[in-house]
Image (cartoon, helix red, strand yellow):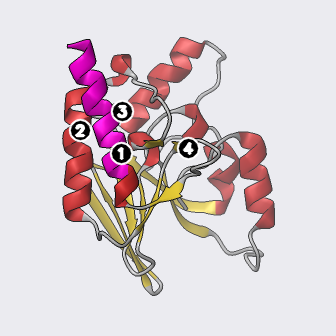
Amino acid sequence: MVDTQFPATAASCLAGLPGRSDRLIDVVINTHHHGDHTSGNGIFRKAVKSFVAHENVPGLQMASAAKAGKGQTPVVADETFATSWRRELGDEVVTAQYFGNAHTSGDAIVHFEKANDVHMGDLVFNRMYPYIDVPSGANVQHWITVLEEAMKNYPSDAIYVSGHGKAEFGVEGTQDDLEVFRDHLSAMLEHVS
């Protein structure tokens, strides 16, 4: 699985998984540390063998929790990687790749190779103004580079899943949607400069 959203939606998702009974989920990959992608980790903890994220994500989660001051310790990845991670899961091969600071300093792109799905996390806000998390290491200029690397490294015919999307565009798209967002960031950076 990729990301866990919030506790309520995570509970609904877990309850709705067909045919799981007592079988554990092999892995949950967190694309980055933000609560709308990781707050459901606690709900999934007992049902998952392993949580995976970029090596910066646990520290960013802990810092965010401390800043929020609610006294809750987040469930963080028990397996991290610096640049890439790969696992064969049944008939599928799943990879996670880190191309450097972009939306945060811990954004991973998750690729389901045989399904030909590429989960971009918040590296793509489909037709929306992005949240730029500077305190967590965001770098708009390098974000553009990361999107270009994604377009070079992943199949052009894949389904690309965005972290957020306007209702009329949704969260599933193509490389064209990555290009639109890259061009948005480029125009924004040029305007601000």
Circles 3, 4 touching at the beta carbon (< 8 Å): no
**Dot 1: few (<14), some (14–19), or many (≥20) neighbours within 10 Å?**
some
Q: Residue at x 48, y 26 (%)?
A: 62
Disc nearer the start of the sequence (2/4): 2
**Highlighted range, magenta:** 178-193
- Magenta span contains residue 186: yes
Q: Looking at this view, is 22 or 29 the one in front?
A: 29
Circles 1, 2 touching at the beta carbon (< 8 Å): no
Image quarter hosting the N terminus: bottom right
Residue ID for mark 3: 103
Circles 3, 1 touching at the beta carbon (< 8 Å): no
Considering the numbered disc 4 on the image, is that residue within a helix, a strand or a loop?
Answer: strand
**Amino acid type of the residue that numbered disc 1 sits on in the rendered structure:** Val
Image quarter hosting the C terminus: top left
Q: Residue at x 47, y 29 (%)?
A: 129
**Amino acid type of the residue that numbered disc 2 sits on in the rendered structure:** Ile
